[in-house]
């Protein structure tokens, strides 16, 4: 039997087998999930968002077919009334789409559009968006769903629940436009269990809207089969279990990555010389590091810092977010800034090793104005090699006021004494230095 014929038969058989027992609202939600998976799949093949959306808008029968496959693959789950999670849907559909791509190659888009009929041969695929393209229909439908009311004028229960958490309707609509499947998540089956779990972890109620706004897909992931096992896996890698509320707030997408992605990043951190304890500290302080590509981002950045003579393992531990910066747009301009002011590569490497955040600062808003003021302070530029943390203090609220006090007192303190000490300790150090200077004057 030809593949196209088999696709058609599968669709008919799967549909008759399962669609009768699945609630219409759940089918609608699964269709949105299937569309999201198919969109992602097409984008990975090089199609633009607009082209992928246009193909999918013409492919209702193929979307129905994908949902039917879910019902066939997970028949036992539906018989006991359990919903599939986003990851389960993805895991079921991606291998199937990959098998179709292997057979049909560049004709896959035609297979999808013309399903269940054979594809039209030699039909070109345009990889640019047409002008004035209409809004994505699935977004329109999803937003309409979250705003529609019952005859009594009530919004859907899940929308009301989210608003009670502090998420206004405009925020819900914005999330839905970005991720239409969110509109079809059930309250009791998906949204509420995840929210309650986050609250139990110690996440403040006020943070829930922010977390769901960053990663609404969390509500589509099974607690028992995905979220909790992933957290346990990360705790085994060293993530501090007492810090989960902060970790999730910083980067809620962390819990949606695969274990292979975690392993790839952790192996890189070990390769850079971090201990298992310090790997855990990095993942806890900067969970976004998991989102950085090892080969495209982390390794080239490590190579660049090594070329400056910096201690890469120390830099990863102290300021891992530096590794998310662009080498060309962020790192090289800062290096050039210090070279132009007479610093050697070795001195720059020492500065970045001592103060990892140095390269995260803006040239125009931070480094340049603070350098210009430094030149008026009467200190040798070598002081910045010893204490590059100077660039981390507020120019107007810390640096200028304290330098003014030091100059008024007519004494000289080390740069780190002027800036790093608390107000009381700074006053004590200033007073002590003034007494010492007075004693020297009296002796003369």
Image (cartoon, rainbow, N blue to C red):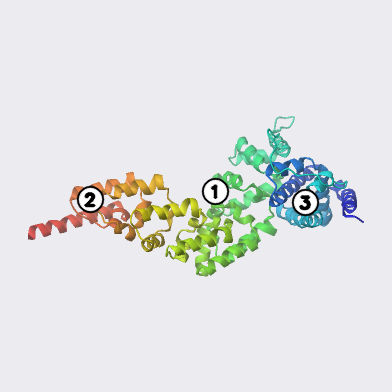
Q: Is residue 237 visible?
A: no
Label 3 secondary element: helix
Label 2 secondary element: helix
User: Which mark is in front, 3 or 1?
Assistant: 3
User: Which mark is in front, 1 or 2?
Assistant: 2
Residue 364 is marked as: none
Q: Is residue 356 left or right of residue 295?
A: left
Q: Residues within 10 Å of mark 3 (few under 14, many from 20)?
A: some
Q: Residue at x 60, y 44 (%)?
A: 213
* 282 w.r.t. 146: above or below: below
Q: CA distance from mark 3 to mark 1?
A: 49 Å
Give the image location of residue 81, x and y in percent: 79, 51
Q: Residues within 10 Å of mark 2 (few under 14, many from 20)?
A: some
Contact between labelled residues 3 and 2, with CB atoms less than 8 Å apart: no
Residue 106 is marked as: 3
* Viewer-proximal residue among 7 and 306: 306
Q: Residues within 10 Å of mark 1 (few under 14, many from 20)?
A: few
**N-term mark: 3 or 1:** 3
In the picture as drawn, the residue positioned furthest to the front comes out as: 122
Q: CA distance from mark 2 to mark 3?
A: 72 Å
User: Which mark is in front, 2 or 3?
Assistant: 3
Say which residue label 1 marks: 204
Q: Residue at x 55, y 61 (%)?
A: 241
Q: Residue at x 40, y 58 (%)?
A: 355
**N-term mark: 2 or 3:** 3
* Viewer-proximal residue among 236 and 157: 236
């Amino acid at each position: 039997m030809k593949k196209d014929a088999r696709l058609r038969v599968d669709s008919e058989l799967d549909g008759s087998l399962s669609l009768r027992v699945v609630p219409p609202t759940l089918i609608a939600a699964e269709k949105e999930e299937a569309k999201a998976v198919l969109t992602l799949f097409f984008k990975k093949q090089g199609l633009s968002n607009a082209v992928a959306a246009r193909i999918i808008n013409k492919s209702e029968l193929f979307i129905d077919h994908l949902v039917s496959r879910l019902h066939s693959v997970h028949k036992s789950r539906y018989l006991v009334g359990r919903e599939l999670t986003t990851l389960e849907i993805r895991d079921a559909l991606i291998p199937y789409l990959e098998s179709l791509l292997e057979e049909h190659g560049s004709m896959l888009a035609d297979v999808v559009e013309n399903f269940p009929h054979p594809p039209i041969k030699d039909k070109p695929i345009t990889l640019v968006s047409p002008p004035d393209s209409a809004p994505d229909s699935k977004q329109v439908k999803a937003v309409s769903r979250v705003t529609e009311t019952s005859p009594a004028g009530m919004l859907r229960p899940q929308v009301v629940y989210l608003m009670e958490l502090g998420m206004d309707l405009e925020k819900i609509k914005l999330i839905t436009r970005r991720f239409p499947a969110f509109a079809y998540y059930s309250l009791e089956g998906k949204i509420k269990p995840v929210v309650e779990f986050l609250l139990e972890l110690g996440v403040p109620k006020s943070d829930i809207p922010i977390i769901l706004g960053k990663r609404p897909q969390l509500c589509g992931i099974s607690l028992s089969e995905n979220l909790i096992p992933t957290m346990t896996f990360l705790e085994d890698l060293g993530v501090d279990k007492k810090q989960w509320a902060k970790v999730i707030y910083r980067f809620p997408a962390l819990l949606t990555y695969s274990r292979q992605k975690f392993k790839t990043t952790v192996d890189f951190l070990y390769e850079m010389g971090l201990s298992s304890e310090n790997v855990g500290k990095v993942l806890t302080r900067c969970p976004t590091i998991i989102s950085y590509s090892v080969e495209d981002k982390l390794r080239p950045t490590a190579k660049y810092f090594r070329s400056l003579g910096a201690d890469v393992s120390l830099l990863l531990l102290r300021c891992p977010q530096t590794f998310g910066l662009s080498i060309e747009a962020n790192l090289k301009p800062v290096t050039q800034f210090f070279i132009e002011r007479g610093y050697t590569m070795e001195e720059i490497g020492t500065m970045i090793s001592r103060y990892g955040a140095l390269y995260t600062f803006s040239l125009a808003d931070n480094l340049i104005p603070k350098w210009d003021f430094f030149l008026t302070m009467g200190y040798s530029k070598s002081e910045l090699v010893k204490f590059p943390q100077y660039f981390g203090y507020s120019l107007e609220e810390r640096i200028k006021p304290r330098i003014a006090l030091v100059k008024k007192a007519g004494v000289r303190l080390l740069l780190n004494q002027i800036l790093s000490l608390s107000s009381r300790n700074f006053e004590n150090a200033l007073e002590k230095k003034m007494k010492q200077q007075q004693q020297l004057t009296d002796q003369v």
